[in-house]
Amino acid sequence: MKYVAKYLLFLFCMCSGLAYAQEPKAFSSMTLAATEAAIKAGLDVNSHDEKNATALMWAVAHNPDPEVIAALIRAGADVNARDTSDNTVLIWAVANNPRAEVIAELVKAGADVNAKTDGGATVLIIAAANNPNPEVIRVLVKAGAEVNFKIEAGSTALFFAAEFNKKPEIIAELASAGADVNMRDTLGVTPLCKAAAWNTNPAVITALIKAGAEVTERDKNGATPLFEAAKYNRNPEVVTALVKAGVDVNAKDQEGMTALMGSAQYNNNPEMITALVNAGAEVNSCDDKGMTALMRAARISPNPEVISALVKAGADVNATNKDGHTPIIAAAQMNSCSDIVSALASAGAEVNATDKFGYTALIEAAWHNRNPEVIMALLKAGADAKLTTKSGKTAFDYAKENEHLKDSPACSALSQ
């Protein structure tokens, strides 16, 4: 009976080894004892799945025990193997595993610390973008990772950390390793600009500034970090962090556009408007074409709360640009969101005002807008459908020629 039991155990180990050879993913959570048993049973440690991912790749990505990695390496696992996407074992590790001991085990076994993905990103770049542990960065740098290596677009590891990593400690570690905090990519963008635009953790902004990042540097389009934050970031505390560093909240770009204008046009978060206004942004400042922040919001924003935030801050709802367009004319011409027109009308916009060409908001909507609800919102707000252009055309005349309006109830409403 004892021999039968031993034979059954032998068969179990053999079957287990074959199963693991076919399923490298199993090593994501396998214990050291199970790993050693599989190896002893004849596991091919370099077998791979349909994406060329090996047992070692799965282990380094998700297994917290460095002894499992060491056991696979001792058994002959290739530390520089690549999957079908050209990612190496070390890239799998730094992208997923925060355990520095695992990274160190691979480096010790000869993993290439300057290997690149098929997109040209190095191991350090992948780590900077994804890994929360600064010790991982330290291990890679100590092993010879190139800190200021640039991909084709001119971005370094610090750029990727600034944009994607929420841990300010990663910024500090890269900076202490010699990362150039004011390096520019091919578009003239700095790491601080990247962070300001896309990283929602204000502590990352603070870490970059503490490391020597210039807060007033502009890219090739004249945009500063504050401009990028105002336009794209969802967290108003990022703006606050930049303001505390001494940025000019009313600085203008090459077209005379301010951060508040950028926020009004591109950012749907009304709290960003409030943060900028509280920091001293001039709400009725104009760009080179006479456009105010409210006009820019009226043209593009889908969120009426952005309009409300600007109006609450004192925005002039009847200001005009160089073409005589008021915010409600701008909205009627370009914005398909009828709630924007309604918000402006409720705030006191003159619905029947004309631009310098003699066009009203209703005529502009009938001519250019694709949404019949914008027409209905203007009519509800008191727009006069009988007013004409200098050439004698009414809103109905334009609506009949608008492919998006001609068969709509809005077009019929204009004819009455």
Image: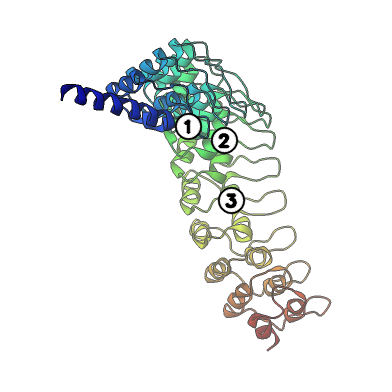
Q: Residue at x 27, y 21 (%)?
A: 33
Q: Residue at x 63, y 37 (%)?
A: 223
Q: Which residue is mark 3?
A: 266
Secondary element at image label 3: helix
Q: Earlier in the sequence, mark 3 or mark 1?
A: 1
Disc 1 marks a residue whose amino acid type is Ile
Q: Nearer the viewer, residue 250 or 147?
A: 147
Residue 404 in picture, x, y percent from top left:
70, 73
Disc 3 marks a residue whose amino acid type is Tyr
Q: Which residue is mark 1?
A: 205
Dots 1, 2 in contact, CB < 8 A: yes
> Could you say which quadrant of the image residue 353 lies in?
bottom right
**Residue 225: image tag:** 2
Let me know if residue 219 appears in the view: yes
Q: Residue furthest bottom?
A: 416
Q: Nearer the viewer, residue 341 or 50?
A: 50
Q: Quadrant of the C terminus?
A: bottom right
Dots 2, 3 in contact, CB < 8 A: no
Crowding at dot 2, Cα within 10 Å, few <14 / some 14-19 / many 20+, comes out as: many
Dots 3, 1 in contact, CB < 8 A: no
Residue 147 in picture, x, y percent from top left:
55, 17
Disc 2 marks a residue whose amino acid type is Pro
In the picture, measured across the screen, residue 401 lies left or right of residue 291, that is right
